[in-house]
Amino acid sequence: MTSTACFIIVSRNDIPIYEAEVGSAAKREDAAQLHQFVLHAALDIVQDLAWTTSAMFLKAIDRFNDLVVSVYVTAGHTRFMLLHDSRNEDGIKSFFQEVHELYIKILLNPLYLPGSRITSSHFDTKVRALARKYL
Amino acid sequence: MGREVSESCIDSLLTVMVSTYCNRFYANKPELAARRIEAIGYQVGHQLSERYTMERPRFSDHLEAIKFICKDFWFELFKKQIDNLKTNHRGTFVLQDNRFCWLTRMSIDQSPENGTSEELSIMADNKAMQSMHLYFPCGIIRGALSNLGIPCAVSADISNLPACSFVIRIKA
């Protein structure tokens, strides 16, 4: 089953620190830019919504054609945003929780400057594996 | 992610860290040593706050975050909670710990009735060394609160050992 999915992590200072196309569909050049554009546009909505609830997982907050944006906000106001076309909410929530744990492990690295880009290929491999498993 | 470290290891590590920074790296520059130690604490607090807030819902306001520091965060670090929390409702909080774990091994100087000037200067040095040990926990609190979105300044007060008060001033 092919699915399109684009995952980004945005830090508390609104700087994207990680981006990945994790869908199983074939990757198209223009689609990648469009996905990033939609995700960045959804940041305003996240900003408003994040203060109304104390939950971490804000479900689907925005839609574009048939793609849906789901967001997970951590206590440190780091946002994990996923643009996807599937409707598997539980899978997406589990995906976010596992990525949260991976993110904390990156953060515990004393040589990692919080708010800088995540360049670890290990992290990248693991995120893609999780995406294949849950999405 | 749940491995454990012995408490005596942490105690020794902190003692050695303070003494190395004060006597070897920045000998005769106590302000620089203090800032470095506080910066280490800031990074540690930043990382720990992210780790310990993973399972729980996010905070709705400043008081919730401070209560998290007093209860869950302090419990994870020191196996006990803060004993007393005071606030003036205008951005200042005082956290009092009646038996601060990292200071329990320090001697409590009894002030002599008719102290000679030599004894008094030794006591002043002791006080200065003791306050050096407090920059690390102040940094931890500041790092944790900054990560939760609350920029603040933290100072510590040890007028009666082993109780220790941390004063948090939130930047408006």
Image (cartoon, helix red, strand yellow):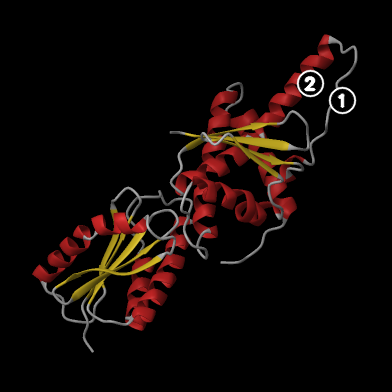
Q: Name the residue under label 1.
A: B110
Taking the spot 33% from the left edge, 77% from the top edge, the residue there is A131
**Residue A133 showing in the rendered view:** yes
Give the foreground label among 1 and 2.
1
Element class at badge 1: loop
Element class at badge 2: helix
Label for residue B123?
2
State left or right for residue B117 relative to residue B60.
Answer: right
State left or right for residue A49 relative to residue B85.
Answer: left
Q: Which of B55 and A129 is in front in this view?
A: B55
Q: Nearer the viewer, residue A29 or B19?
A: A29
Taking the spot 51% from the left edge, 38% from the top edge, the residue there is B39
Taking the spot 64% from the left edge, 53% from the top edge, the residue there is B71
Q: Do labels 1 and 2 share a chain?
A: yes
Taking the spot 53% from the left edge, 31% from the top edge, the residue there is B35
Q: Identify which amino acid the numbered label 2 is placed on.
A: Met
Q: In this view, does B145 lie above or below A50?
A: above
Residue A65 in the image, given as x and y percentages of width and height: 13, 74
**Residue B44 showing in the rendered view:** no
Quadrant of the image containing the N terminus of chain B: bottom right
10 Å crowding of disc 2: few (<14), some (14-19), many (20+): some
N-term-proximal mark, 1 vs 2: 1
State left or right for residue A122 relative to residue A21.
Answer: right
Letter of the chain that mark 2 sits on in the rendering: B
Q: Which of B55 and A127 is in front in this view?
A: B55
Res A9 quadrant in image: bottom left
Residue B103 in the image, given as x and y percentages of width and height: 74, 39
Q: Identify which amino acid the numbered label 1 is placed on.
A: Gln
